[in-house]
Amino acid sequence: INYTALSASGNIFISDSYDGNKKIRLTYDGASDLTGDFYNAKISSGSLILANNTIAPYIKIDDKNKMTIIKINLNKINSKLRKKILKQLKNFITKQDNPVILYGDFGVPSWNRYLRKFIIQTRLSVKNKILFTKNSSYNIFSTPSFYILGFNDMGVDNIEIKDAKDNKQISFDISF
């Protein structure tokens, strides 16, 4: 029963892969910047200022393969504020006229009631396998909270976790 509940909310052992002709290398380190290798695409960037001055940087790719990439860090946000932030993110995502990728530390697992509702409403899905990033990258007793949410025709490859003293750095490839 637990396995079925977990697998309905995301991938457990294997990330969704997709054999696309474009790849983007993204890195998450808990800092406020959105960094990556955007294959020399024409991009524009900005920041969403959400509830309680939570900032979510985003990049819009404006070439042939249009998309919006948003990075979020809700690790130290309480549940009431997280619910409000997810509602504001939902409003932003549903108004986009191009595919959206949202990644980062959501502070809760994908089977959390509010995050699950957010995933359904935005029509995004969890693309990465479960990553245990809290205390150690291999601590199966920690709660997973790092997710890469995306559209149907995309996948995630080459996930690497570098343990740092204060922040973990997670690098991965998005293919579409």
Image: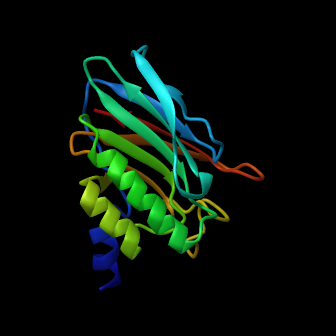
The quarter holding residue 152 reads: top left
Specify whether residue 128 is in view.
no
Q: Is residue 108 left or right of residue 129?
A: right
Pinpoint residue 127: horizontal percent, then vertical percent.
34, 51
Pinpoint residue 78: horizontal percent, then vertical percent.
59, 71
x 42%, y 60%: residue: 86
Q: Is residue 4 left or right of residue 70?
A: left
Q: Nearer the viewer, residue 107 or 84?
A: 84
Q: Is residue 133 left or right of residue 145?
A: right
x 70%, y 51%: residue: 167
Specify whether residue 136 is in view.
yes
Q: Nearer the viewer, residue 59 or 46?
A: 46
x 26%, y 60%: residue: 121
Pinpoint residue 85: horizontal percent, then vertical percent.
47, 59
Q: Is residue 46 above or below residue 85?
A: above
Give the image's coloring scheme.
rainbow
